[in-house]
Amino acid sequence: MTTTLTPSKPPKPSPAAGPSAARRLLTTPTVGPLVALLLACVFFSLNSEQFLSGGNFSLIIQQVMVVGTLAIGQTLIILTAGIDLANGAIMAFGGILMAKLAAEGTVPPLVAIALGLLVCAAFGAVNGMLVTAIPLPPFIVTLGMLNVAFALTHIYSQDQTVVNLPAPLTALGETFAIGDTRVTYGSLLTILLFLLFAYLLGQTAWGRHVYALGNSPEVARLTGIRTARLTVGVYTVAGLVYGIAALLLVSRTGVGDPQAGQTDNLDSITAVVLGGTSLFGGRGLVLGTLIGALIVGVFRNGLQLMGVPSIYQTLITGVLVILAVTVDQLSRRRIR
Amino acid sequence: MTDTPQTPVLQARGLVKRYGHVTALDGTDFDLMPGEVLAVIGDNGAGKSSLIKALTGALQPDEGEILLDGRPIRFRNPLDARRHGIETVYQDLAVAASLDIAGNMFLGREIRRPGLLGKVFRMLDHKRMREESARHMADLKIGLRSLTQPVETLSGGQRQGVAVARAVAWARHVVVMDEPTAALGVKESGQVLDMIRRVRDRGLPVILISHNMPHVFEIADRIHIQRLGRRIGVIRPADRSMAEVVAIMTGALELDEDASKEASRDASAADREEIRASGSS
């Protein structure tokens, strides 16, 4: 479509000027979580001398990197108005597979890692196909897959923890120095993954389509987006990310643990919701999920430093989740 | 419109669609002339939406043919029809709520940055898409404060405006509007009708499906009346009263069959139509 009548400057609306930068900032769902995170950091800095240090922050990131990485995949799926209850179990299976193949020397360590990633991606692909082809609700599909992956993990590992892992599997647990602070390569990888997906969701057509799909599959379909292919793609990419989480898990703990990740599915949903992403799909940012994961990490860490029993950490996390969903629901009502 | 014979932009001959033993389309014809607003009206179950679906690729007719610019064509799906320049504005399914205006205008047809950024990194050209969106919106005189606010923050009329602007921006042949004013208030309906006029003034023919007789009479150049799976007539709003048209639509009045056939061939044939009362009410 070529328009010859092009005004040199479009009179109104102008593309650059928004409804004022400040207003846009306030309507961004990530701002609330960010403020909450900063307030929490201020609070714990005042109440604990050890809190505000590079070493402690490096530790917090290490503590949240596995759930945080799972939450990246969870964010993708929730943006399409889905949910993934199986991600922790898929990660556990991927982790035990990598660890066992490499430790027993069945295949070279790097091949073991690749196979683990591939199997996790395949789990995601199967979830996506069940959600689109039959179609079944994501909640039910992933609930089933949670049990399947959990059982496979225990069958394959025979309930044994896999030890003596070769170097490539623990490489992400190694550290490098930023000033006086030791940071693990895994933490760095997690941050890079968040940035990558922030880019993909915000700057590519694929990202736009994910949001459109979450808003309304029918609108997306009528605008010519291949919704089934897109959905399967999202679940597959999420599965691949769970595979990376599996590698992070193995490198952090140094073992293949069949009991790992059992509450990580819900913890990843917690991170997504705390980050301001709507469970109804189509609204949210993956960097919000990073903030959400950090909020959980900072509260756990800070309360621990203050000597608060760990059960109170869980209590506070629960309250925060309900608060976050309430804010989401109320802001939606204001829009409608 | 001139008096010289023109090739219809979009035509259908003898379309039949059956669902089991329900006949949705029973050999219906259809003609859309260049540069006109053609309203399609009919009672529930008249085959209105089946006809529109067939014309926009959402449904495959069992029999009959569709011609675009006089050449036979088959649309396998809605995307196929869109590739041929037929854009549809759906009543409730027009926009993705959380995307901004530019995001919606270019949804499924995004523009990437030139060079390496676009080719390798698949980066979108947000600036260019916003500028072009602003131009399209300005062309239709849709005033908005910002192109970066999510469309869910817009009023119903403005949202419909975004959908119309998108359709117009991409349509090369035909814009189809399915009940564009059904969910809107008086003022917003007026805005949408103005937009339809501007679309026509730019030379794009519009097919308007509507239940709202005052709107149909206000905007349409011709009215296609669908009844029992067939086109029973095409009239001009100036020649008939609203009550007459409703009577024809519901079967209380009958159009003379020969005159109706004439009307299908030529827009001016509406002048020669005869109406006779069928006696029932």
Image (tube, coloured by chain):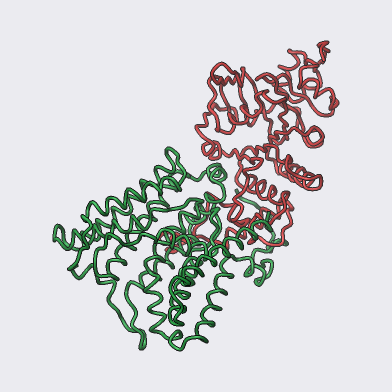
Snapshot quadrant of residue A169: bottom left
Q: Which chain is red?
A: B
- The answer to whether A185 appears left or right of A138 in the picture is left
State the image coordinates of residue A50 (x, y, percent, origin top left): 43, 87
Residue A168 pos. (x, y %) = 22, 68
Please state if A306 lies on the left or on the right of A168 as rendered.
right
Give x and y (percent) for residue A234: 42, 52
- Reply above or below: A22 against B267: below
Q: Is residue B122 visible?
A: yes
Q: Position of residue A91 (x, y in %)?
A: 33, 58
In this picture, residue B115 sits left or right of residue A182: right
- Colour assigned to chain A in the rendering is green
Left or right relative to A293: residue B63: right
Q: Is residue B132 visible?
A: no
Residue drawn 19% across and 63% down?
A109
Q: Nearer the viewer, residue A308 or B156?
A: A308
Q: Quadrant of residue A219?
A: top right
Tell me the residue at 61%/63% (across/down).
A327
